[in-house]
Image: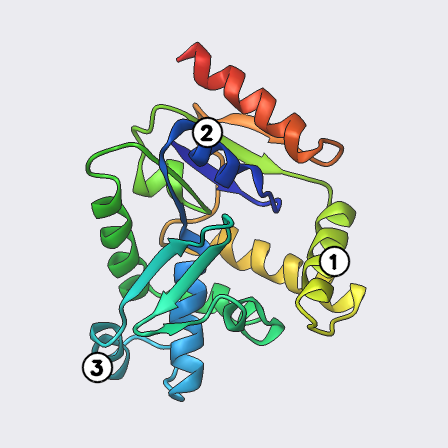
């Protein structure tokens, strides 16, 4: 199941739990790579240094007993670090690098070999799993997206202003939509879900109905 997202949502985890599927946040994988490159002062450009760095990166995701998603970078938990504005402001640059995309797309496809997976990200239904049973293009109004992101950062104790977040979202959308390699775009056969005014439970109810239609 492929979920191409622009809007933030938590129900994909609920869906995976309900279906007893594996949930994968592919965006967290790109954030983890970005965090690694920043921490090791590696330039965001193709070349030997980047290729070598990618061989040193191992990313995995686990779920805690209380249902929280945890991202691991090598032996460290980086879930909070990769959500910082510093990473958010640079992740689209890293995601536009072909060598990074090729590495992570390969890893993501391995995760879906046995099916039974819910994966969200910005190229899942168009590039990673073009033959997914169900593709959902998730979106929301800009104001709603900014407000949700602001609340998320506040909950984590991360300071950011409304205007900073709006600028960051616009920049990411532009870079992701215009990059040559795996651009953000709605698959022709994807279902559109605007969650601007929908609750988490309301969104899950709609998607479960779509699943039952398969």
Check disc 3: other Cα within 10 Å, few if <14, some if 14-19, many if 20+: few
Of discs 1 and 3, which sits in the foreground?
1
Looking at the picture, how far across and down is residue 174, in whole percent?
A: 58, 56
Residue sticking out furthest to the bottom? 41
Q: Which colour scheme is used?
A: rainbow
Q: Quadrant of the C terminus?
A: top left
SS class, disc 2: helix
Of discs 1 and 2, which sits in the foreground?
2
Q: What is the C-alpha distance between the residues marked 1 and 2?
A: 26 Å
Q: What is the C-alpha distance between the residues marked 2 and 3?
A: 43 Å
Looking at the picture, how far across and down is residue 12, in whole percent?
A: 50, 38
Indicate left or right for 43 with 68 as reference: left
Of discs 2 and 3, which sits in the foreground?
2
Give the numbered dot on residue 18. 2
Q: Earlier in the sequence, mark 1 or mark 2?
A: 2
Would you say residue 135 is visible in this rendering? yes
Q: Quadrant of residue 60?
A: bottom left
Tell me whether circle 1 and circle 3 mark residues in contact (CB < 8 Å): no
Q: In which quarter of the image is residue 96?
A: bottom left
Looking at the picture, how far across and down is residue 4, in whole percent?
A: 48, 40
Check disc 2: other Cα within 10 Å, few if <14, some if 14-19, many if 20+: few
Q: Name the residue under label 1.
A: 151
Q: Name the residue under label 3.
A: 48
At x 41%, y 45%, the residue is 123
Indicate left or right for 126 with 202 as reference: left
Would you say residue 95 is visible in this rendering? no
């Amino acid at each position: 199941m492929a979920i191409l997202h622009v809007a933030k949502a938590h129900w994909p985890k609920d869906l995976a739990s309900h279906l007893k599927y594996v949930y994968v946040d592919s965006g967290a994988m790109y954030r983890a790579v970005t965090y690694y490159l920043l921490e090791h002062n590696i330039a965001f450009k193709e070349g030997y240094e980047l290729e070598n760095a990618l061989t040193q990166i191992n990313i995995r995701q686990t779920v805690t007993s209380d249902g929280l998603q945890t991202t691991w970078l090598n032996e460290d938990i980086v879930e909070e670090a990769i959500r910082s504005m510093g990473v958010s402001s640079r992740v689209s640059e890293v995601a536009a690098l072909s060598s990074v995309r090729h590495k992570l797309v390969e890893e993501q496809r391995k995760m879906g070999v046995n099916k039974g997976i819910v994966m969200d990200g910005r190229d899942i239904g168009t590039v990673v799993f073009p033959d997914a049973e169900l593709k959902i293009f998730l979106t929301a109004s800009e104001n709603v997206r900014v407000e949700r992101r602001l609340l998320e950062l506040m909950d984590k104790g991360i300071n950011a202003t409304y205007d900073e977040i709006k600028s960051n979202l616009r920049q990411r959308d532009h870079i992701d939509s215009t990059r040559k390699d795996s651009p953000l775009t709605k698959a022709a056969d994807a279902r559109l879900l605007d969650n601007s005014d929908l609750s988490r439970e309301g969104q899950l109810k709609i998607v479960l109905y779509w699943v039952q239609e398969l």
